[in-house]
Image (cartoon, rainbow, N blue to C red):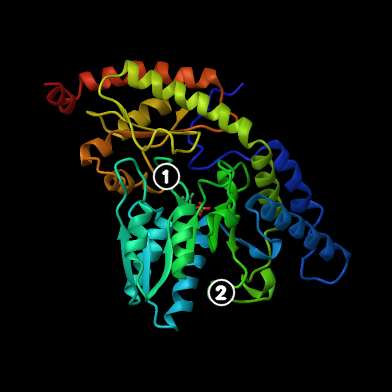
Amino acid sequence: MSELIYLDNAATTPVSDEVFDAMLPWLRDHYGNPSSHYSIGYDSKQAIDTARAQVAAALHCLPAEVYFTGCGTESDNWAIKGAALRMADKGKKHLITSAFEHHAVLHTMKALEKLGFEVTCLPVSRAGLVDPADVEAAIRPDTALVSIMAANNEIGTIQPIAEIGAICRKKGVWLHTDAVQAAGNIPLDVQAMQVDMLSLSAHKFNGPKGCGALYIRRGVLPVNFMEGGGQENRRRAGTENIAGIVGLGRALEIAVRDMDKRAAHEKQLRDYVVERVLRNIPGTHLNGDAEKRLPGNANISFPGLEGETILLDLDMHGICASTGSACNSDSLDPSHVLLSIGLAHEEAHGTMRFSFGPQNTMEEAERLCDVLEEVIPRRRAMSPVWNTLKK
Ligand SMILES: *Cc1c(COP(=O)(O)O)cnc(C)c1O
């Protein structure tokens, strides 16, 4: 039995047995190039077509509207750079996004700013929500694209994408959503949401790392990101990661099949931890709306302490969690997401994200609380910041 308690499912997830079994033959036995015209090539092509149909069923779109990519980051880059470059030809060089997007979006926007695009970065409320009225007010005649995430990766808040989609459709502006955290966790229907492009990534829903997808609505034409051969209907070149694509399709199919059961399970663990921590550890609070959030996400501030300290203490007890975004964990800057919802720097520094997955158990949630109830008061007793706060 493993001692490890993995509570960082928003950073990445383990590949499930069902997904692994589906992938294995495509790593070893079936090696044909899907572009080749003989039987083992056709087999590979068939496997990709099956995965494409699985993704299309999950998103409520046509298989021809699904494009496989190398990761969620690539999907975001393609959607945003591709739309910006396409629209620049028409004199549209204004982009809209929000302050708490993933760096795959924010840094892409920054790169486009350097190329002469103008970016409006919308504020986020204390509850961690983008206001559709702000989107509407920001749209201009020269707006090329709106990109707002479906669910935030740090605080788990679910954005009103359908309302934003209705506004963008009415104004004739393309809407992209980074649904990398949302996919597999909450229902996604690209037609109901009225999005033009949607990014997802297999490793966030018990699929393999290094495989993403981008939904591109029929008739929407972002400029190609990867040029080369004719793969992916001539829009994303490069010999396909067949095992990865098979894993992505199967993992998403399973996630949708088990969604209600999984969500109920993760929510039960999440709510137990939040309730017990807030009750037993003074000064703690939950970040992000309590209702409009991913079922497995708990983001809790522990004033008076550094998240890094808590992280190391938890690691010594075999518990994996996060101080915020995994991409930020090498940097000492406070998370841009926590600052965007109005947390002070010190508060942001003392914040932890616990993200639950289908494989976690109630015993693990209890163990986390036991450890926190021991570690936090002990560290706080040594913390000058906490001793000042207490007064
Ligand atoms: C993880 C994540 C990404 C990046 O996806 P990769 O497949 O790791 O490149 C982008 N956006 C959000 C919201 C994420 O959580």
Q: Position of residue 117 (x, y in %)?
A: 34, 74
- N-terminal-most mark, 2 or 1: 2
Structural distance between the alpha carbons of marks 2 and 1: 32 Å
Q: Report helix, strand or loop for mark 2.
A: loop
Numbered tag placed on residue 221 in the rendering: 2
Can you say whether 191 is above or below 90 in the image?
above
The residue nearer to you, when weighing 310 against 264, is 264
Question: What's the mark number on residue 326?
Answer: 1
Q: Residue visible at 62% across and 69% down?
A: 218
Q: Is mark 1 within 8 Å of ligand 1?
A: yes
Please state which of the two labelled residues, at mark 2 or mark 1, is closer to the viewer: 2
User: Picture coordinates of residue 30 (x, y %)?
Assistant: 81, 56
| Towards the viewer: 76 or 60 | 60
The quadrant the N terminus occupies is top right
Q: Is residue 84 above or below residue 130?
A: below
Secondary structure beneath dot 1 equals helix
Q: Which mark is residue 247?
A: none
Q: Residue furthest front?
A: 170
Choose top left, top right, bottom left or bottom right for residue 387: top left
**Label 1 environment density (alpha carbons within 10 Å; few <14, some 14–19, many ≥20):** some
Q: Quadrant of residue 18?
A: top right
Residue found at the very far right of the displayed protein:
39
Q: Nearer the viewer, residue 288 or 17?
A: 288
Residue at horizontal 62%, vertical 37%? 259
Q: Look at label 2 and name its amino acid.
A: Leu
Taking the spot 35% from the left edge, 51% from the top edge, the residue there is: 131
Tag 1: amino acid: Ala
Does 255 appear above or below 216? above
